[in-house]
Image (tube, rainbow, N blue to C red):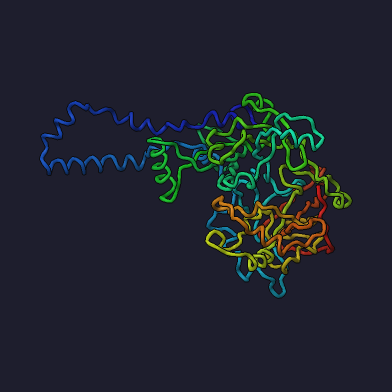
């Protein structure tokens, strides 16, 4: 960890006050309200117009150079950090339904796009390349939101659990679809940048933003500030910041964090409760009916992949995960997505299937429809570098209704794609009456337990060569 003052706690304490813009108003001085009406009354029409033009000409440049816009944490981070990810205008998923993603003569499948979701079920970050860890892509599913619920007495008794104390349960788009509108930006230290005020900051941070506008004049000021700072289409947002690195003991104590159990499906994870970082407005925006919490997985106490009996015989490490559903990596084929899209009923809120609905880490192109379901081991290799990566393909991804939520708007469709998945993709005997799309994988990292081993990376454009094929049967928790 960095020295005190340079970590998450130190940086947040040094960030500018949001009321910084008011200093400009104070510097202009005060105009006597008693003499102003008399002065204006003495002016004729021409003089009055000239006065107004003069004031506008004087004030406008000052307003442009020093706009009364609150200084946000992301503004401060720009002094020492750079935002990580593929800019939206350069996305590798801009033409998802193009025939170019179908199999091409003489070409093997390739990695089309990469995504991480630092906070589970919130907006993802598209990447051009990523480090691969035993637990998946670096920075993926580090955090999860949770709700504090008291089990119903009847449910607790039927499960043989007499304990009815409140339990933290993880949250996804299934319960709170507006989580799709919670944006997460990853900021990494940039060696080329320095700051007199902040000094040298060596840690990465997440800046979390969500739509929010206060009532009354304060809300109007936020609306104007958003238009000035981010364009006419921008809406007011509220943001908060989280550390990427696991907090030190000093930070845990200073910021009031604590460890607690959080239920993730049938697992119980002992994770760090960082709910003190959540603005109260977020629960109101999401429509949370229970107390909202935020948890960070402890890297020394990750969840084991309990259903990975097969890969355990092939890997020299036990696969672990943070807040992923069940496996470290999730793969989706654009060709298979296109096939499913042709069967999907379209309307005004479902014009086409978007790969991002399925929240995969690795999105591929160039394979036959559903060919990925025959893969057992795949080898990825870069055409331009020496990077290569081998992945164990464990099982199909069994789908719930989460993909019904539009990743752009947070609006839940009434039936699609859950209907089309259940009707046409009930293909796994281990998951009757459930639809399947995508595959779950574990990284095959030689020497994963050896810190001296060279890091493994995955990047867009890597070729995919199938090392082994076979059948898959889903194993329930």
Residue 388 visible within the image: no
Q: Look at the picture and state if 124 lies above or below 472.
A: above
Based on the displayed image, in which of its 4 quarters is residue 109 positioned? bottom right
Query: Looking at this rendering, what residue extends furthest in the bottom direction?
Result: 105
Is 376 on the left or on the right of 239, as rendered? right
Q: Look at the picture and state if 190 lies above or below 247.
A: below
Residue 38 visible within the image: yes
Give me the residue at 72% from left, 57% from top.
331
- Between 254 and 260, the one nearer to me in the picture: 260
- Between 299 and 5, the one nearer to me in the picture: 299
Q: Position of residue 13 (x, y in %)?
A: 54, 28
- Between 252 and 372, the one nearer to me in the picture: 372
Is 38 on the left or on the right of 66, as rendered? left
Give me the residue at 58% from left, 64% from top.
346
Give me the residue at 67% from left, 44% from top.
139
- Between 218 and 454, the one nearer to me in the picture: 218
Q: The N terminus lies in which quarter of the figure?
A: top right
Q: Position of residue 456 (x, y in %)?
A: 74, 51
Based on the displayed image, in which of its 4 quarters is residue 24 positioned? top left
Q: Position of residue 79 (x, y in %)?
A: 51, 39
Query: Looking at this rendering, what residue extends furthest in the right direction?
Result: 313
């Amino acid at each position: 960890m960095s020295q005190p003052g340079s970590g998450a706690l130190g940086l947040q304490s040094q960030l500018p006050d949001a009321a910084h813009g008011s200093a400009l108003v104070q510097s202009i001085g005060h105009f006597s309200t008693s003499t102003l009406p008399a002065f204006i009354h003495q002016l004729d029409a021409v003089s009055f117009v000239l006065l107004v033009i003069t004031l506008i000409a004087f004030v406008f440049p000052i307003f442009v150079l020093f706009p009364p816009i609150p200084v946000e944490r992301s503004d401060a981070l720009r002094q020492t950090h750079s935002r990580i990810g593929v800019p939206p205008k350069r996305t590798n998923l801009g033409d998802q339904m193009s025939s170019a993603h179908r199999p091409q003569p003489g070409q093997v499948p390739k990695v089309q796009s990469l995504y991480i979701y630092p906070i589970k079920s919130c907006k993802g970050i598209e990447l051009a390349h990523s480090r691969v860890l035993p637990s998946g892509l670096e920075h993926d599913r580090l955090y999860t939101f949770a709700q504090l619920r008291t089990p119903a007495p009847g449910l607790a008794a039927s499960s043989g659990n007499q304990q009815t104390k409140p339990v933290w349960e993880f949250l996804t788009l299934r319960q709170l679809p507006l989580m799709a509108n919670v944006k997460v930006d990853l900021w990494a230290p940039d060696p080329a940048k320095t700051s007199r005020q902040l000094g040298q900051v060596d840690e990465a941070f997440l800046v979390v933003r969500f739509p929010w506008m206060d009532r009354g004049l304060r809300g109007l000021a936020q609306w104007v500030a958003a238009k000035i700072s981010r364009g006419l289409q921008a809406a007011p947002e509220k943001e908060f910041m989280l550390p990427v690195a696991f907090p030190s003991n000093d930070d845990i104590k200073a910021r009031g964090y604590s460890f607690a159990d959080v239920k993730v499906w049938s697992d119980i994870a002992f994770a760090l409760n960082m709910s003190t970082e959540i603005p109260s407005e977020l629960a109101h925006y999401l429509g949370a009916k229970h107390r909202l919490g935020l948890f960070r997985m402890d890297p020394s106490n990750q969840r084991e992949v309990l259903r990975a009996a097969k890969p355990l015989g092939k890997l020299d490490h036990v696969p672990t995960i943070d807040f992923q559903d069940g496996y470290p990596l999730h793969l989706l084929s654009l060709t298979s997505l296109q096939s499913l899209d042709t069967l999907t009923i379209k309307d005004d809120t479902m014009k086409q299937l978007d790969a991002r609905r399925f929240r995969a880490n690795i999105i591929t192109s160039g394979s036959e429809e559903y060919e990925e379901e025959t893969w057992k081991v795949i080898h990825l290799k870069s055409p331009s570098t020496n990077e290569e990566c081998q992945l164990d393909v464990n099982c199909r991804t069994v789908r719930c209704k989460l993909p019904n939520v539009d990743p752009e708007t947070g609006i839940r469709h009434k039936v699609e794609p859950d209907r089309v998945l259940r009707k046409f993709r009930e293909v796994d005997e281990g998951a009757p009456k459930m639809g399947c799309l995508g595959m779950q994988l574990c990284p095959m990292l030689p020497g994963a337990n050896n810190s001296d081993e060279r890091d493994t990376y995955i990047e867009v454009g890597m070729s995919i060569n199938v090392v082994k094929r076979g059948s898959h049967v889903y194993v329930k928790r």
